[in-house]
Image (cartoon, coloured by chain):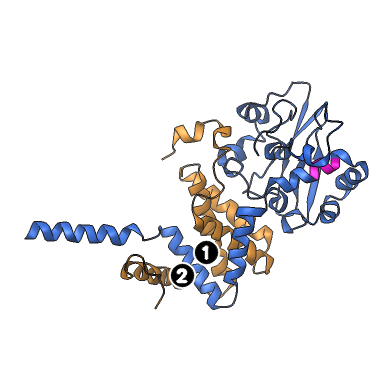
Chain colours: A blue, B orange
Amino acid sequence: MPEFDSKKVADIHQQLHSHLPSDSALRIKALETLLVDKGLVNPDTIDAWVEAYSEEIGPKRGAEVVAKAWSDSKFKQKLMQDAPAAIDELGYLGKATAHLKVVENTDDVHNLVVCTLCSCYPFSILGIAPAWYKAAAYRSRAVRDPRGVLAEFGVHINNEVEIRVWDSTAELRYLVLPQRPAGTEQMGEDELAGLVTRNSMIGTDRDLGANPGRAY
Amino acid sequence: MIDAELTLRPLHKVDGDPVFDEPWQAEALAIADILVSKGMFSARTWSEALGKALKDAQSVGAVDNQQTYYNCVLSALEQLVAEHSDIDQQTMATKRQDWEHAYLSTPHGQPVRLK
């Protein structure tokens, strides 16, 4: 019964490998085991971090900051002068926002944020950076050809508008304060926050009045 | 080899992609952030190591996607742990083999544990 045996062996082999994690997953498991054994990390802390960034911490926090700045001039003034202190008021201060600068869009200026080195990002208030922010295509072109990059996002900036590109580092990260859309004077902070897109706080979105309520 | 189609596709096409494709990617980022918080290495050291890993990957033509990014996160993390603790690369490789063996020797459906 050699044919049956070889098929059985192949099936068993496939079954065994079907639940074998990838090489990368095994390497992380190994690293985590060693770090936990040495008392250098607590597995509960890892679980809590993953849960927080999967469920809780995301661009809604940044949208809340933007909506408050639109509605409260004193808060906006503080945000522009000392962003970490202003964000601390909302309880969202974290390592990634401890050194944060807010840059404001105006009729004449559009701001775009990138990290040309790796992927520095104010993740305490925007969550994990989107895939495109980490891509070489974005990191290498945002400084060289910001208008071209913005056009790929469907954002066409008039030539009279100056584009300022901010290169984030581990020590200084940036958040764009987009312009408040016209016709929103009666809106409260919650409603305003619903107009803010994640990309508008990085600078790959601009006119929030054009498509209100877009998903983050 | 560079995946021209992927590299050239408009950036906004990847806007809605999930931030993590697999759980290990979240764990890798979590461990890196926790070790920075605990002071094993600085945020700057981390960004420099990750930046170098990304540059190296790009220079050998790795596909410009999340898999490559998180593989770089993993390599940078292993390198910094080896440099800033007494856990060396060989110890990591041995432990990885132990886990692989544990998975292969555990019947499907049973919890996988290191012996």
Residue at the location (78% across, 50% down)?
Answer: A100
Residues at discs 2 and 1 in contact (Cβ within 8 Å): yes
The magenta span reads A65-69
Question: Is A45 left, or right, of B68 in this rendering?
Answer: right
Q: Amino acid at mark 2?
A: Met
Q: Nearer the viewer, residue A98 or B54?
A: A98
Quadrant of residue B39 in the image? Answer: bottom right
What's the magenta bit mostly, secondary-structure-wise?
Answer: helix
Query: What subunit carries mark 1?
Result: B
Secondary element under disc 1, as helix, strand or loop, is helix
Magenta stretch: includes residue A68? yes
Q: Which residue is mark 2?
A: B92
Residue at the location (58% across, 54% down)?
Answer: B50
User: Among all residues in the image, which is located at the extreme top?
Assistant: A159
Q: Few, some or many C-alpha atoms within 10 Å of disc 1 (few <14, some 14-19, many ≥20)?
A: many
Magenta stretch: includes residue B61? no
Question: Is A153 left, or right, of A189 in this rendering?
Answer: left
The answer to whether residue A177 is visible is no
Residue at the location (67% across, 69% down)?
Answer: B38
Vertical order, A208 against A170 (above or below): above
Is there one chain holding both mark 2 and mark 1? yes
User: Among all residues in the image, which is located at the extreme left?
Assistant: A1
Q: Which residue is mark 1?
A: B78
